[in-house]
Amino acid sequence: MRNMRWRLHRLERLPQLQPPPSPLKQIERLALRHLSDDDMKVMIVMTSDLERGVRSTISERESAVVAAQNAAREAEARLAGFRCWAEAQRKGGQRR
């Protein structure tokens, strides 16, 4: 019986049996693909700094990265059938 529970647990963890990501998460994931490796590194540093409460202002480079991410979100939201990223968030990412 123990072996059966273990096998069932393993089957439940398969990606095919996981619920699909919400449209908002898909938009976010696709938007991140638009960013360069350098931009991603800057985002990682910014995130870790925010979590530690290290910085209060952002540099020009960081501001450009945030703008690039926002533009990528907007583009991906439009491709997903929304008018903009804000509409996707308002509707909770529900498909049309």
Image (cartoon, rainbow, N blue to C red):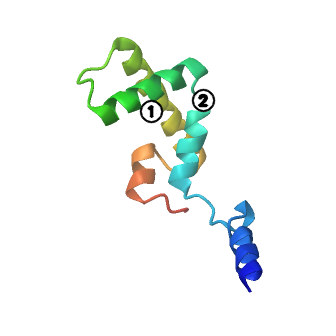
Give the residue drawn at x 30%, y 19%: 58
Quadrant of the rendered image containing residue 70: top left
Is 19 rendered above or below residue 56?
A: below
Q: Amino acid at mark 2?
A: His
Is 75 rendered above or below residue 11?
A: above
Query: Mark 2 sits on what residue?
Result: 34
Q: Residues within 10 Å of mark 2 (few under 14, many from 20)?
A: some
Quadrant of the rendered image containing residue 78: top right
39 with respect to 19 (left or right): left
SS under mark 2: loop
Query: Mark 1 sits on what residue?
Result: 70
Give the residue drawn at x 72%, y 81%: 2
Residue 84 on image: x %, y % = 45, 44
Is 3 rendered above or below residue 95?
A: below
Give whichever of discs 2 and 1 has the lower sequence position. 2
Which quarter of the rendered picture does the C terminus lie within? bottom right
Q: Relative to the observer, which residue lies in front, 41 or 32?
A: 41
Residue 71 on image: x %, y % = 48, 30
How many numbered discs? Answer: 2
Residue 89 on image: x %, y % = 41, 52
66 with respect to 80 (left or right): left
Which quarter of the rendered picture does the N terminus lie within? bottom right
Q: Residues within 10 Å of mark 1 (few under 14, many from 20)?
A: some
Q: Quick one: which residue is furthest to the bottom in this view?
A: 1
